[in-house]
Image (cartoon, rainbow, N blue to C red):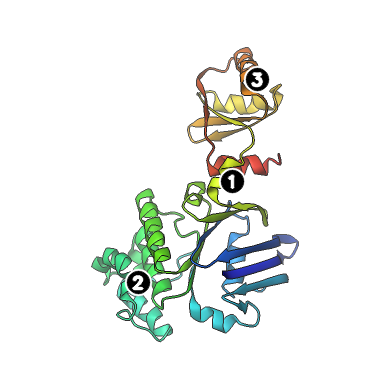
Amino acid sequence: MSVITVSHLHKSYGKVQALRDISFEVRDREVFGVVGPDGAGKSTLFNILTTLLLPDSGTATVLGQDVREGYLEIRKHIGYLPGTFSLYPDLTVEENLVFFATMYQSSIQENMSLIEPIWLQISPFKNRPAGKLSGGMKQKLALCCALIHKPVLLFLDEPTTGVDPVSRKEFWEILASIKQQGISVVVSTPYMDEATLCDRIALLQEGRFIQMDTPQNIVQEFRGHLVTMTTRDTFRLLKLMPDCPIDCTFYPYGENFHVIFYDDLAQILPVFKSFLQKNGIIYNSLIEIQPTIEDCFIEIVKGR
């Protein structure tokens, strides 16, 4: 059963096309990830699905209701954590939670079982103004507020942006427990490593879905051989790579340099090493590795 069905969705802001012919479904009790860089169209898509923005064309149904005509019914049964902190900074942690529970004719006690694991972490700060919480605590409070009425479907727009690594890990552990309680989750993220924690993902680039599948299948469909190299000549190598005689894709990856080769590695690697030596590029290692979602995204965007 699908909790979201989208067909040929378009949205523009003047001459800027934010969404281009988007079609997909989200299944019941699924964690569906929308993965892409800033400006790809993630927030626009979420604003349409949460009935805050109307599409130019195409259709979108959420929990069986059309986003244009059934927006009031949709809002009763979804939770939404937007990309920017949207709670009341001058109210305390507890006052924010009480306010949002009251908005849905509910109470903290009524659905405490759902938010208890999160509430236990933030309750020591229940009398602190929300605006004075750390980034991770703000997001946990916002998640509590989005869950306090026990929604059927939860939308999270870049929930871990600006959050420290430990809080990011904790946040995704919380999402796993939410799924176990029967809530479907749609989450957007610019972090490719978080994509592997979703049941299925859609890679979004310039308003289009360029691939949609399970993270495992996307990695398995990676074309080419991925090699990581360690060098201190990264910037000089970037300038030289357009002159490389081998068909390849290259890009910095953390402290290393990743190269995707599309031909037989045993034949072309010696040619590549000769190219590096000829141009005086000193490197410590050239090792073939398994691709990540980020490598797959880059390879797809390159248009191969």
Mark 2 or mark 1: which is in front? 1
- Using the image, determine if residue 56 lies above or below residue 207: below
Instruction: State the residue position of label 2.
Output: 114
User: Residue beneath label 1, please?
Assistant: 218
Query: Mark 3: few, some, or many residues within 10 Å (few <14, many ≥20)?
Result: some
Q: Is residue 84 above or below residue 39?
A: below
Give the mark, 2 or 1, whose residue is nearer the N terminus: 2
| Residue at image point 31% right, 73% down | 113
- Tell me which amino acid carries mark 2: Leu
Whole-percent x, y for residue 268 in the image? 65, 20
Q: Give the residue at the far right of this rendering.
A: 15
Q: Position of residue 51 (x, y in %)?
A: 59, 75
- Nearer to us in this view, 250 or 266: 266
**How far is the residue under mark 3 from the one under mark 2?**
56 Å
Q: Where is residue 98 in the image (x, y as percent from the top left)?
A: 34, 80
| Nearest to the observer: residue 215 or residue 299 | 215
Mark 3 = which residue?
Answer: 268
At numbered mark 1, what does the secondary structure look like: helix, strand or loop? helix
Residue 95 sits above or below residue 298 on the image: below
- For marks 1 and 3, give the CA distance: 25 Å
Q: From the image, which quarter does the C terminus lie in?
A: top right
